[in-house]
Amino acid sequence: MMHDLIDRTAELLDTHPEFLADNAIVILSAAQLDVLKRFLEDVRAIGPGLNFLIERCVDENPGYNFSWDNDGTREQDDELDRRIERLCADLGFIN
């Protein structure tokens, strides 16, 4: 399956800058970017003080590189881990 994998970092800086670390890079297809944006909207519900930042979200086709940082509470970290596992599946990174 062909993907239109391009650097989407600038677009995310326009729409969700609070979730991107300095020097973050996001390389995804348009469909994957939509999935990531929905995830970011939903992640706000985890609560204040989450401090979630994407460092890399790259579809390497095959493979992927997804790293993030978070300084929330233990409960927030646990919830974020669950959501990120679902996100990686929704992005097609894992089965």
Image: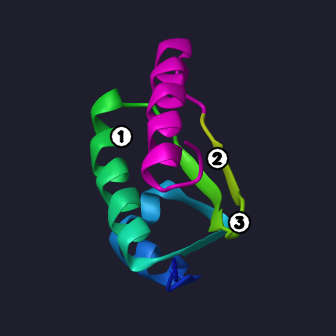
Q: Nearer the viewer, mark 1 or mark 3?
A: 3
The residue identified by callout 1 is: 43
Queried whether the magenta region covers residue 93, the answer comes back as: yes
Could you tell me which quadrant the C terminus lies in? top right
Q: Earlier in the sequence, mark 1 or mark 2?
A: 1
Q: Earlier in the sequence, mark 3 or mark 2?
A: 3
Res. 62 mark: 3
Res. 68 mark: 2
Magenta highlight range? 71-95
Q: Position of residue 41 (x, y in %)?
A: 28, 50
Position of 77 with respect to 50 (left or right) is: right
Report which quarter residue 33 is drawn in.
Answer: bottom left
State how far apart marks 1 and 2 are (Cα). Answer: 13 Å
Out of 53 and 48, give the one closest to the viewer: 53
**Residue at figure coordinates x 45%, y 22% from the top left:** 79
**Residue at figure coordinates x 45%, y 37% from the top left:** 86
Q: Amino acid at mark 1?
A: Val
Position of 43 with respect to 73 (left or right) is: left
Other residues around mark 2 within 10 Å, as few (<14) / some (14–19) / many (≥20): some
Q: Amino acid at mark 2?
A: Trp
- Observer able to see residue 47: no
The overriding secondary structure of the stretch rendered in magenta is helix
**Residue at figure coordinates x 64%, y 66% from the top left:** 58
Q: Position of residue 15 (x, y in %)?
A: 33, 71
Q: Position of residue 67 (x, y in %)?
A: 69, 50
SS assignment at label 3: loop
Q: Determine the residue located farthest toward the front in the rendered image.
A: 1
State how far apart marks 1 and 3 are (Cα). Answer: 27 Å
